[in-house]
Image: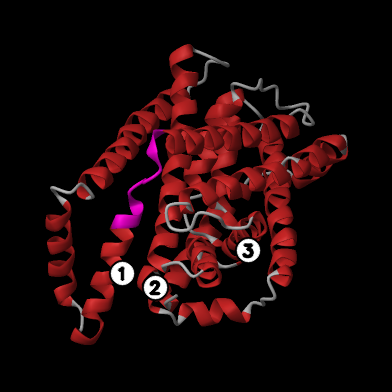
Amino acid sequence: MKFWKVALIVILSALFVFLFLRRVDFLEIKKIWRTIPPMYPLGFLLLALPQYLVRATRWGLLLSPFKKKIAMRSLLNFTLIGFMVSYLLPGRLGEIARPVMLAEKEKIKKSQAIATIINERLFDLLFVMLMLVAYLVLGLGQPSPTLPRLRTLALLLLPAVLLLFAIITLANTEKFFPGTERLIRSLTRVLPVRSREKAASFAVHFIRALNLNLGWKGILKVGGLSLLHWSIILLSYWLLMRGFSGLAMDLPTTIPFLAVIFVSAAIPTPGMAGSLDLASKYALTGLCGASAETAVAFTILFHFLLLAMPIALGLFALWREGLDFKIISRLKKKDELSTVL
């Protein structure tokens, strides 16, 4: 990643951390932490395991049009490695590294593997927004001045995701794909001659791979796994909140909190530092009237636990695959990775 991009990410992260921690009584935060029963953080950690298993299973379904059978061990290992890399390095590098590494091992096109990550994220966004819309429409949880802003967020993002799926499907139809390919090749003419054909070929395969060739049954399975995945995450946050006396949130009210931190996690700071924290503080104080100290105490704890499990398991997965961190620096030199970065 270029120096100016890294510098910008670091500056943004530092600014968010400053805003997150300003005017906070750290002695009060320590007192709050001492009152938390250990069973709640432990439950949060244990629920991380089924999350990654469900995510790996869903990834295998998205990859099935390109290779029918991929071992669950490989899917889980590279899922964990990807999250570990994203949490340790800036720029969400793991989102590209994990499909590229899996593609090399399983002998499938890297463009196809990368496309599955885009679809994975679209399904994530779709189901988080659907949960938020259901929360708003059904009038669940507690009234809050934050909800009108979340309603606007849902009204913008949910149609945008559905439109993206529609555009991808339309661009890949027999009638429109020749035009899609011509557009790609015309856009790549700005590139040097030596890399033009390779880039065009990569883009064509990538657009093709975005099309969900799973049939309705397969798409419903992916949707069901997405719902299960985010339900487990929702339960884990709500369980951890129960350990804080200053967080009187019921399970439905955890849905808008989850939506806020999900969107904030898209900012590519290292380990979501600052962006996730500030969004969490804003959501907790706005949704349930939590004190700044309670919101900060909860956020620091859940952020640490959120990173600890995939980093530890990712290191173990890296060892199981016979890899080390040198593979990341080698991947940066590959065309498929460098074009995205």
Q: Magenta stretch: residue 149 in it?
A: no
Q: Residue at x 45, y 67 (%)?
A: 108
Residue furthest out toward the bottom: 194
Helix, strand or loop at mark 1: helix
Report the amino acid beneath label 1: Phe
On screen, 314 above or below 232? below
Give the residue pinned by disc 2: 336
Horizontal side of 238 relative to 171 (left or right) equals right
Percent position (x, y) of residue 169? 26, 44
Give the residue pinned by disc 1: 202
**CA separation in Å, label 1 and label 2:** 8 Å
Helix, strand or loop at mark 2: helix
Range of the magenta residues?
A: 208-216
Q: Nearer the viewer, residue 127 or 249?
A: 127
Q: Nearer the viewer, residue 18 or 315?
A: 315
Q: Residue at x 26, y 82 (%)?
A: 195
- Disc 1 or 2, which lies upstream in sequence? 1
